[in-house]
Image (cartoon, rainbow, N blue to C red):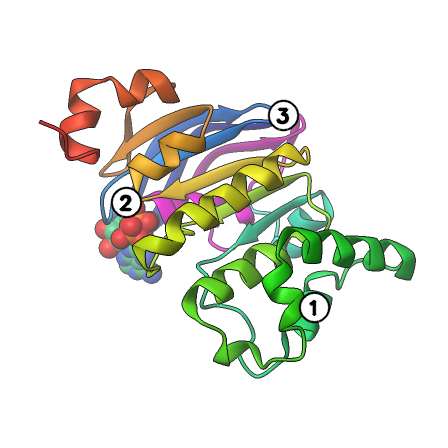
Amino acid sequence: MLAIENLCVSYGRIQAVKGISFHVNQGEIVTLIGANGAGKSSTLMAIAGLIRVQHGTIQLRQQNIANQNMHQIARQGMNLVPEGRRIFPDFTVKENLQIGAYRLRNPQKIQTLQENVYDLFPRLKERERQIAGTLSGGEQQMLALARGLMADPQILLLDEPSLGLAPILLDTIFEHILQINRQGITILLVEQNARLALQIAHRGYVLETGRLVFEGSAHDLQHNNMVRQAYLGIT
Ligand code: ATP
């Protein structure tokens, strides 16, 4: 569904992503794990059309979308869910959801999507009139995911959904991601929390200073000594 070939991203002289290639099949959860500064967010933002691709191709259903802007890419069914705090804090929960559906014209479709996200996240339904900036961190992350779903995506790009969340909320958020995937939505998940990411992913890639150093099934990664020591804290 998504195939990245030789992707390079630079910020001036700093080369953040140094020619990486990977793919995501339809229906999969694929995770990109790595330490701070490894290039995970840069990769995701380049795929989503938020920053320039210096070299390489990004094929979405066999079409090269490299350097299209984020609106063109969203129209083709691929949406980025940024880290949770980037919701619209002065709007209500419901208004944030409606903004997520801005491209859609059919009110019936929007209604169905909204019912679906309220089924997935009953907490948001209870709080639909609340100003989003007053939600807790976990609720804001749920809202970010829900807003992403309101665009009716086929593939979601998730940027560090665990960031800043209390440990007690982490399992809940990852359970939600699994439920979203079970609805047929393909997921590319960028995460520092490798342990949780590998619990829900089918496959994964390890990024170190802009290069892929390991790839495999989630099971392979969980049992690889290098991954266990460097990313799972198991010696
Ligand atoms: P983190 O988990 O800390 O967010 P990451 O794996 O997502 O890390 P990136 O944010 O993609 O990593 O950063 C990769 C490299 O690019 C880092 O060395 C970072 O300092 C650099 N970088 C990122 N954004 C910029 C920018 N706007 N200008 C200059 N350098 C940048």
Tell me, yes or no, whether the highlighted magenta stretch contains residue 211.
no
In the picture, which quadrant includes the C terminus? top left
Q: Which residue is mark 2?
A: 15
**Mark nearer the viewer, 2 or 1:** 1
Point out the tag, 2 or 1, that comes first from the N-terminus.
2
Q: Does the CB distance between marks 3 and 2 fall below 8 Å?
A: no
- Element type at marker 2? strand
As shown in the figure, which amino acid type bears the numbered disc 2? Gln
For residue 1, above or below residue 36: above
Image quarter for residue 128? bottom right
Q: Which of the numbered marks, if any, corresponds to residue 110? A: none
**What distance separates the C-alpha of mark 3 from that of mark 2?**
30 Å
**What distance separates the C-alpha of mark 3 from that of mark 1?**
26 Å
Residue 59 lies left or right of residue 171; in this view the side is: right
As shown in the figure, which amino acid type bears the numbered disc 1? Ile
Q: Which residue is mark 1?
A: 99
As shown in the figure, which amino acid type bears the numbered disc 3? Gln
How packed is label 3: few (under 14 Cα within 10 Å), some, or many (20 or more)? some
**Mark nearer the viewer, 3 or 2:** 3
Q: Residue at x 22, y 18 (%)?
A: 224
Q: How many numbered discs sit on the rendered protein?
A: 3
The answer to whether any part of residue 13 appears in the image is no
Image: magenta residue range? 38-66
Where residue 8 appears, x then y in whole percent?
38, 38
Q: Which residue is mark 3?
A: 26
**What distance separates the C-alpha of mark 2 from that of mark 1?**
34 Å
Q: Residue at x 36, y 43 (%)?
A: 191
